[in-house]
């Protein structure tokens, strides 16, 4: 048994090294369109204050924009993405640490799930906001758990900073923020009644709510949408579920995969209710079933994308790791059953990661270089059916070509 445990520890080290390596490799390729957009928006500003006072577009990812603003032109793509890479690696560490505090098995499973996740790898290797969203969003959950366990001001301050950072990363953090409000209220109500819940709720949530009101009044109401794909909500949800589980994005397989994921989440809700885990039931019900549709109705986004549900990812992984751990304890499931399922998960995720590593997010510059080499003319002219996009590419390629 001790030998087996040591082998698993060595395997965990290898998995973590893979997580670091693949995130760095994914960050070395050229910018994709959205990254070029973020880069060109920021490079035309005169001061960092304008990120908050003059740049009213949804592709202004405030913390990401600050990082890009202070990076001089002509830097390597890896340097522009370094904040996302570091946040992505820290997210792996925090998720695994949270799991190992519960049990050795859950820690190992969470480490594998997060390290191989194509969604985590993609967003941890691009110069945008989503890697920071995952780190700050899950970090706020951890700090609130610690506060409920032992109320202390440093944990409350930590929650303030992490939740504000998450809101500055993406407004879909509201799913988690509202769910954590219900989680804190029920947990402290069970400990000391409504007065206790109200007092601690004010201490923990007062500062982030004040920030959000201020941010909404002076910035968010001026935001305009930049455009993009707009599939139906159900299609975006299916795409998200497919990438979470690592199953092929083929019509019927994708639908089955998304249905299985939904069934697992509903079973977890049912288990919370049957075992009288009221605060856990409240958290998961709000997070998975109530907050996302309410947010989408209130905001009515002009552009729909599966990343609008990305903040749910760490909590889905927690549910999945719990399911895998329970499967390991069932006598009717062979001992190799869970490792085999995790192996299929890893292979499926690598199916999405390999094209990113092989082709990157864009092949614009190699294409232009090829055209330049093949033409006999003194100049090369290229265009786009989108005038704003053509200006962005022209400005960007003037620096990097």
Image: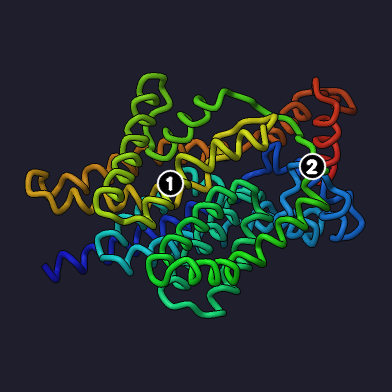
- The secondary structure type at the circle numbered 1 is loop
Disc 2/disc 1 C-alpha distance (Å): 31 Å
Q: Quadrant of the N terminus?
A: bottom left
- Pinpoint residue 398: horizontal percent, then vertical percent: 85, 41
Q: Residues within 10 Å of mark 1 (few under 14, many from 20)?
A: many
Q: Is residue 73 above or below residue 290?
A: below
* Residue 358 seen in this snapshot: yes
Residue 241 as seen in the image, left or right of residue 399: left
Residue 223 badge: 2
Q: Nearer the viewer, residue 139 or 118?
A: 139
| Rendering quarter of residue 162 | bottom right
- What coloring was used for the rendering? rainbow
Residue at the far left in the pictured view: 331
Residue 117 badge: 1
Residue at 77% over, 60% down? 71
- The secondary structure type at the circle numbered 2 is loop
- Pinpoint residue 316: horizontal percent, then vertical percent: 40, 47
Residue 20 as seen in the image, left or right of residue 297: left
- Pinpoint residue 217: horizontal percent, then vertical percent: 80, 51
Q: Is residue 157 above or below residue 166?
A: below
Residue at 59% over, 54% down? 133
| Rendering quarter of residue 52 | bottom right
Q: Nearer the viewer, residue 153 or 346?
A: 153
Residue 323 as seen in the image, left or right of residue 206: left
Nearest to N terminus: mark 2 or mark 1: 1
């Amino acid at each position: 048994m001790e030998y087996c445990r040591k082998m698993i520890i060595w395997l965990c080290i290898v998995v973590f090294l893979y997580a670091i390596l693949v995130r760095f490799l994914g960050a070395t390729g050229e910018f994709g369109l959205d990254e070029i957009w973020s880069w060109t928006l920021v490079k035309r500003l005169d001061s960092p204050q304008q990120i908050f006072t003059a740049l009213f577009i949804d592709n202004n990812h405030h913390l990401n924009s600050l990082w890009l603003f202070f990076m001089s032109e002509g830097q390597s793509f890896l340097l522009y993405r370094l904040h996302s890479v570091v946040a992505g690696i820290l997210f792996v560490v925090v998720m695994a640490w949270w799991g190992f505090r519960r049990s050795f098995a859950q820690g190992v499973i969470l480490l594998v799930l997060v390290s191989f996740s194509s969604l985590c790898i993609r967003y941890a290797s691009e110069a945008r906001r989503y890697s920071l969203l995952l780190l700050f969003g899950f970090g706020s959950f951890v700090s609130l758990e610690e506060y409920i366990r032992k109320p202390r001001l440093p944990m409350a301050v930590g929650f303030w900073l992490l939740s504000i950072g998450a809101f500055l990363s993406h407004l879909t953090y509201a799913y988690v923020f509202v769910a954590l409000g219900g989680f804190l209220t029920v947990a402290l109500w069970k400990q000391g009644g409504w007065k206790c819940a109200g007092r601690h709720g004010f201490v923990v949530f007062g500062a982030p709510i004040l920030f959000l009101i201020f941010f909404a009044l002076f910035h968010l109401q001026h935001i305009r949408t930049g455009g993009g794909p707009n599939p139906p909500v159900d299609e975006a949800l299916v795409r998200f579920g497919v990438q979470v589980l690592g199953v092929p994005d083929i019509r019927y397989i994708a639908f089955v995969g998304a249905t299985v994921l939904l069934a697992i989440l509903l079973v977890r809700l049912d288990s919370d209710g049957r075992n009288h885990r009221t605060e856990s039931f409240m958290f998961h019900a709000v997070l998975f079933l109530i907050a996302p549709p309410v947010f989408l109705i209130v905001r009515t986004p002009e552009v729909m994308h599966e990343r609008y549900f990305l903040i749910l990812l760490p909590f889905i992984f927690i549910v999945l790791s719990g399911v895998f751990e329970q499967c390991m304890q069932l006598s009717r499931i062979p001992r190799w059953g869970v490792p085999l399922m995790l192996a299929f998960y890893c292979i499926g995720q690598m199916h999405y990661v390999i094209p990113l590593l092989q082709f990157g997010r864009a092949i614009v510059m190699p294409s232009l270089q090829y055209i330049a080499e093949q033409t006999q003319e003194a100049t090369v002219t290229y265009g786009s059916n989108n005038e704003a996009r053509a200006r962005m590419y022209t400005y960007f390629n003037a620096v990097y070509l």
